[in-house]
Amino acid sequence: MRLSHYLIICLGILFSTCKPGVKQQEKSGMVALLEQTARESFYVPANIYASKTRIAHFDSLYKVSSPLERNKFRFLQAESCLFGGKTEQSIQILEELLQIRDKNRFVEGLEPHQEEQLTTLLALSYLRLGEQQNCITNHTSASCIIPIAPAGFHQLPEGSRKATELYQKILENNSHDYSSRWLLNVAYMTLGEYPTKVPERWLIPPKAFASEYPLQSFQEIAPNLGLDDNRLAGGSVVDDFNGDHYLDILITSWAASHQMRLFINNRNGTFSEKTKEAGLTGITGGLNMVQADYNNDGFTDVFVLRGAWLETLGKHPNSLLRNNGNGTFTDVTEEAGILSFHPTQTGVWQDFNKDGWVDLFIGNESSGEDNIHPCELFLNNRDGTFTEVAKRAGVQVSTDGELYYVKGVTAGDYDNDGWPDLYLSALDDRNPNILFKNTGLSRDSIPQFVNVSQAAGLGENISSFPTWFWDYDNDGWLDLFVAGFQRSVFWESITKDVAAEYLGLPFGAETARLYHNNADGTFSDVSEQVGLKKITYAMGANFGDFDNDGFLDMYLATGEVNFASIIPNKAFRNQNGTKFQDVTTAGGFGHLQKGHAVSFADLDNDGDQDIYAVMGGAYEGDIFRNALFENPYQNTNNWITIQLKGTTSNAAGIGGRIKLTLQNNGKTRTIHRDLNSGGSFGCSPLRAQIGLGTADTIRKIEVTWPSSKTTQVLENIAANQFIVIEEKKKGFKQLNLQAFKFATSAGFLLHNPIPIDWFHFIHPKFCIIRT
């Protein structure tokens, strides 16, 4: 779409809405285009996620329907009301339909599977009502985090109480309904009656939730800071957007009319929203974002990805937002030559041709032969514009007969040859995920990629979602993580499989994969031996260092679109690069609401990484408040934060390799980091915050720059400081960033103490430990 098309859209909207004597505010091309997209491709009855539109649609059909069809449309109304947040209306309709069934033994006009769902939907509606009345309206830091602390118990118990009655009724008829068994236990947790009041035969025992390491508890403090945005699934970027070196927060909510929001760090424990002042009004939607300094001007820019999950309705425009360096952003999508219309939520910035300017790869979603969306690779022209070269580079991916529903992409130099490679994670397990090896430049300077998945030992067919390269064992070779994303029964919720896993029963869901780099161009699946052959079912996910021991841990934001998917987010601590320990409950990370973008960041400059997570689902009514988990490890281990400043290489140093040599407890060790924003769904800052364990001095820092391939060496650097290393410049610059305490509120600042009924599982260090 060219600028002329933008003008036509703008003029059309202007003339259609103008009234005599009313001055209209001029809208930018992207703002007008996003409004048109929302109107024509999101808030339409065909979009199953536009629940409020569908409520009105089914209501209109009900009014003109024949007597035989009315119950069918009433059922669809009830379902849409639940998904649209009108839970009490859903309950009313479902109870009416159940009365008809009880009276007549069937409901005329309903399919058998719809009749079977009536009680289940009613139970789920009551459970959701309890969440709305308590966890959302009367939100506390303990809301919906298991083990649910007293501050998170429902003060208005009607919803959960009724849900317990209905789920027991369901289980009486089908004792193998593990989804209902799980939700029954959750309902009792919200009432403060778990485990004592749960019928023994339906109990999921407390020891099933035990953590494997006594990680200190992270407080959820987003409500104190006004960062608990109460909307839907979306993206997050935590980085410095105004050039003061303090970390700010940019978030989206995926609904097409939902405004992007920017929160600036006030450097005193508070944040202020500056969305309007930043010129972002009207920039809406977006399930994910990725940041970079694409024009090497020293300011962090953002790319917004849209249209995911919507298939034929997903031809939404992405947005490139240029940071102007004065606190404002400008949408430059069209002028940068990067405007396209494909369903996507995943992209990665990397300097694939090593010219010192970052390029952009976008993984698109192809859902059928009539809806093919090849992936895109935009090479940076070094003048503010890009050229799309995916086909010439060999990474277009989706073609007739071989479709890829790409959900995650990551870039890194897995074979240490100096050229950044690509890995694509796809939802459909009919084809294996793809590892593309970057073999260098063609004669016309286009990077060339070869699919080496089979040769690299990555040829298994797997349905997966978020992914990343990382060096989890600090051996200097990038390993690969990808979270499995497939339930045992397609039309059911993952809750069934999760419950089975907690009960130690067989399940059919896909598990996570950790592929260890063998340093010879191949990988080995070590998931089982490191303790990760588990259901993760993550959407958003990212990695960082919980306790500053120098080994990378991870937070997985779990869930799916299904309303019954009320399962805990998961967290795993890396034990010296050999094992991963489940620390979900010990760390206070077991959030039951659907998690999406995740960012690890030291927001308060105290040397440890806090975790910001975007919560909420896809349906319009599946809103929930975002979470910020404050890290308590500021006084436990040492650390250093390194910001790279490229001159020959890209300005943010993306793709730079950092190697630290230090001593812990008399032993020499090395720590390796690859500079990037982390996982494929949620962005951490473009700076390396590195835990050092007990070391108070770093014997050597070695930085290998991505374009010049030069290595700078610094020696005997003190720990616990923020530094900037500039390419080809001796020494470093120290940043004098002040640590501060987050603002507190007596009503919200609560740890997640273990409920009294769980005390017989308490470790002497006040942490649940699996025995």
Image (spheres, rainbow, N blue to C red):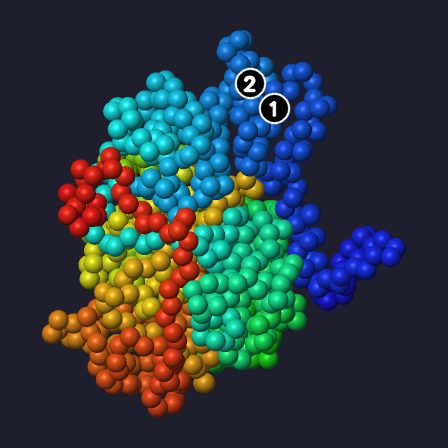
Residue projecting furthest to the bottom: 730
Q: How much space separates mark 2 and mark 1, taking CA atoms?
A: 8 Å
Residue projecting furthest to the right: 20
Q: Residues within 10 Å of mark 2 (few under 14, many from 20)?
A: many
Q: Residue at x 67, y 33 (%)?
A: 57
The foreground one among 13 and 665 is 665
Horizontal and vertical percent position of residue 268: 44, 68
Residue 97: mark in rendering: 2
What residue would you read off at disc 1? 74
Callout 2: SS: helix
Q: Quadrant of the C terminus?
A: top left
> Are dots 2 and 1 in contact, CB under 8 Å?
yes
Res. 644 in view:
yes
Does 271 sit left or right of 80 as displayed? left
Q: Quadrant of the N terminus?
A: bottom right
Q: Amino acid at mark 1?
A: Arg
Does 301 appear above or below 255?
Answer: below
Q: Residues within 10 Å of mark 1 (few under 14, many from 20)?
A: many
The quarter of the displayed image where residue 701 is located = bottom left
Q: Amino acid at mark 2?
A: Leu
Count of numbered badges drawn on the protein: 2
